[in-house]
């Protein structure tokens, strides 16, 4: 049977590498690239079709950071497909990143150095902003837009007699300390990325709890440190040129330095091959690359508790109501 797979943020980096790997795995797939930039989406589609000439690759316009766009995209999906087998929630942003150089130098001489390179804990801050829906942009893109998309697509994801999967591209930068249920959009802090990734971990656990009896299974992955547009934006290009040889050296000792999008997509690809019942909803599946360059996937327990994941789930359902109400008022005014 032809499986339907939707990948958000599929026009570059880890998302595009995943698409390439999925088509190599199953040439019969109906693959849908859900992207906000249609020019880049077209380019990604052409690149995929160049190596998979008979593949079925569809494009879908989706700005996951815009409520209106998510609702319109979901309508389009419902018109096009009768089921969804996999929904990869991969689109993500880290706007205006700043590296704390002092913390980096201090970290280099501490026993925490490996962890610092694996998680960037305490190293990175970002400047967030409020978007046109009145939401914090990082939260809206990395968490809420994806949540709303799942809610809209529930009729296709939760069908009697079949299973479907959602997979979140999270990060080892997801930290409990950066997240607060009282400030789930991270209005007052300076680590919205870390907070949003921790929120996606919590949300995945809650979704599995609420939806697995309806056939919907949610999982979380971390791709490791991958050189993509998102990472390159952290430092000026001359600095990357300088530190790349050091990174390639560190890679020999650190399995989290996956570096290429192909390697980073390992856990996403691995999950595609697993039965949902065999997976642990409370584990984060890490893409890892050994010193000799072998890719593998390893589950590690997530630092999440049921109470907080439940609280976030309820808060998001409430926020969804508010956002829908605001949108219909706005549409009525127009
Ligand atoms: N690189 C790394 O080391 C790590 C990355 N990750 C996560 O991996 C995921 C993929 O990122 P990565 O491949 O690294 O970086 P890229 O910047 O290459 O990919 C991000 C993708 O998300 C898309 N995107 C961003 N905002 C939106 C939006 N509002 N609507 C739709 N699509 C959007 C981008 O599209 P566009 O071209 O239009 O900007 C792009 O296709 C992210 O969730 C990131 O947080 C996690 C841990 C480590
Ligand atoms: C010369 C500079 C001061 C050196 C700075 C090095 C940092 C830019 C990197 C060290 C650890 C890296 C890292 C990431 C980005 C680049 C570093 C901060 C990530 C945050 C990228 C996105 C993620 O989600 C994380 C898992 C990565 C963790 C490590």
Image: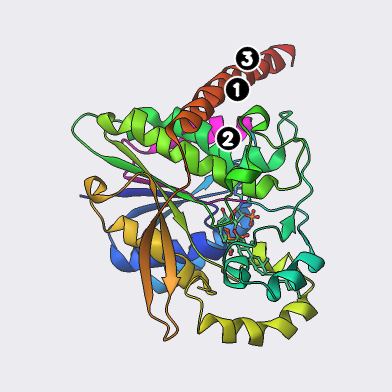
Q: According to the image, label 1 marks what residue?
A: 319
**310 left or right, relative to 145:** left
**Residue 239 visible in the shown view:** yes
Front residue of 331/22: it is: 22
Q: Residue at x 64, y 33 (%)?
A: 184
Task: State the residue position of label 3.
Answer: 325
Q: CA distance from mark 1 to mark 2?
A: 9 Å
**Number of other residues with Cα within 10 Å of mark 3, as a class: few under 14, some 14 to 19, many 20 or more:** few
Residue 23 horizontal/vertical position (percent): 35, 64
In whole angstroms, how far apart are the C-alphas of marks 3 and 2?
Answer: 16 Å
- Residues at marks 1 and 2 touching, judged by CB atoms closer than 8 Å: yes
Q: Considering depth in this image, is 198 or 81 the residue closer to the camera?
A: 198
Q: What secondary structure is marked by label 3?
A: helix
Of badges 3 and 2, nearer the viewer stands 2
Quick check: 303 above or below 256? Answer: above
- Residue at the (22%, 37%) spot, across then down: 162
Q: Quadrant of residue 225?
A: bottom right
Q: Relative to residue 85, is residue 232 drawn left or right?
A: right
Q: Residue 144's mark?
A: 2
Please, is residue 312 above or below residue 334 in the view?
Answer: below
Near mark 2 (Cα within 10 A), the count class, few <14, some 14-19 or many ≥20, is many
């Amino acid at each position: 049977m032809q499986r339907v797979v939707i990948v958000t943020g599929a026009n570059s980096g880890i998302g595009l590498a995943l698409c390439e790997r999925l088509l190599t795995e199953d040439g019969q797939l109906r693959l849908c690239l859900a992207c906000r930039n249609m020019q880049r989406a077209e380019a990604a589609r052409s690149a995929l079709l160049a190596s998979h000439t008979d593949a079925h690759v569809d494009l879908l316009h989706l700005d996951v950071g815009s409520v209106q766009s998510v609702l319109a995209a979901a309508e389009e999906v419902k018109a096009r497909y009768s089921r969804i087998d996999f929904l990869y929630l991969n689109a993500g942003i880290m706007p205006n990143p700043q590296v704390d150089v002092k913390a980096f130098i201090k970290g280099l001489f501490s026993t925490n150095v490996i962890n610092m390179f694996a998680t960037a804990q305490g190293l990175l801050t970002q400047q967030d902003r409020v978007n046109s829906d009145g939401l914090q942009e990082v939260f809206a893109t990395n968490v809420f837009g994806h949540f709303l998309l799942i809610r809209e697509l529930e009729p296709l994801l939760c069908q009697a007699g079949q299973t479907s999967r959602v997979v979140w591209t999270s990060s080892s930068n997801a930290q409990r300390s950066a997240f607060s249920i009282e400030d789930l959009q991270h209005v007052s802090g300076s680590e919205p990325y870390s907070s949003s990734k921790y929120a996606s971990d919590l949300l995945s656990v809650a979704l599995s709890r609420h939806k697995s009896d309806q056939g919907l299974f949610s999982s979380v992955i971390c791709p490791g440190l991958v050189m993509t547009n998102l990472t390159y934006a952290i430092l000026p290009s001359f600095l990357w040129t300088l530190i790349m040889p050091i990174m390639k050296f560190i890679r020999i000792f650190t399995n989290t330095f996956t570096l290429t999008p192909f390697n980073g997509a390992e856990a996403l690809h691995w999950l595609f091959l697993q039965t949902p019942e065999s997976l642990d909803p409370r584990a984060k599946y890490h893409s890892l690359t050994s010193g000799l360059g072998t890719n593998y996937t390893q589950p590690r327990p997530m630092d999440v508790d049921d109470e907080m994941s439940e609280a976030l789930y309820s808060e998001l359902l409430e926020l969804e109501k508010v956002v829908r109400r605001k949108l219909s008022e706005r549409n009525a005014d127009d």
